[in-house]
Amino acid sequence: MSDNELSVLPEPLASPEPAAPALDLQALTERLDRIESFVSKHEGQLTALSERLGLIPAQLRELGNKVDNVTENINESRLHDLLQSLLLLLDLTGQFAATADADHARNYELLRRQMLETLEINGIYMIDTSGRFDPAWHKIVERTSCETPEEEGQIASVFRPGFRTERAVLRYAEVVVKFYVSPSNGD
């Protein structure tokens, strides 16, 4: 055979794979026993962890509700502060209207009426002071005497108007209230 003929011969077959080692059933059984022992030893911890993980969504919802409440309280506080400032401006326009010359007084009164209408449109109402004193709505800042017992408890004048919403008093009406003192019998 020539060298050229040798090159076309197939390469010798590769040697066969070595045989797989025999399975050590005893070692596998021991390993499986160790795994089962670990799982049973930690089963209580795994159950507790699983239960705690199950509580997380409810806790997150509760935390979200608390954040919403805090945010709402902050917003209500800011709104309350804003309303108190607006009520002070309303008081000032009334004072300016009472002390200004006629032209300016009309402008201040117009502004005051527009502010009152805007407050009412937004659910903020002036507290009624045309009757008897009511501690739910009024705060006594002064007392004045009256002639008859029937007049006692009547509002004589308004020191500063009060305002309310449907749910709460924003500022009590500060009023002067009549009180009756019976005349002395010995004078």
Image (cartoon, grey):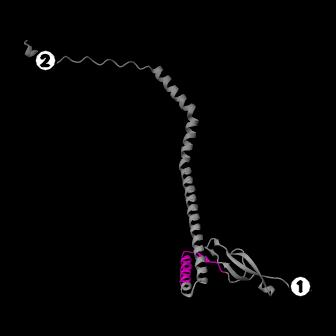
Q: Residue at horizontal 49%, vertical 24%?
A: 31
Residue with the mark numbered 2: 9
- Using the rendered view, name the quadrant where residue 76 is placed: bottom right
Q: Residue at x 56, y 35 (%)?
A: 43
Q: Amino acid at mark 2?
A: Leu
48 versus 80 height, above or below: above
Q: Amino acid at mark 1?
A: Ser
Label 2 secondary element: loop
Between 23 and 76, the one nearer to me in the picture: 76
In the picture as drawn, the residue positioned furthest to the front comes out as: 101
Instruction: Tell me which segment is drawn in magenta.
Output: 107-128
Identify which residue, 131 or 51, lies in the foreground.
Answer: 131
Q: Which residue is mark 1?
A: 184
Residue 28: give x, y in percent of width and height: 46, 23
Q: How many marks?
A: 2
The 10 Å Cα crowd at callout 1, few under 14, some 14 to 19, many 20 or more, is few
187 sits left or right of 127 in the view: right
Q: x, y (%) of residue 67?
A: 55, 56
Relative height, residue 122 to residue 103 (above, below): above
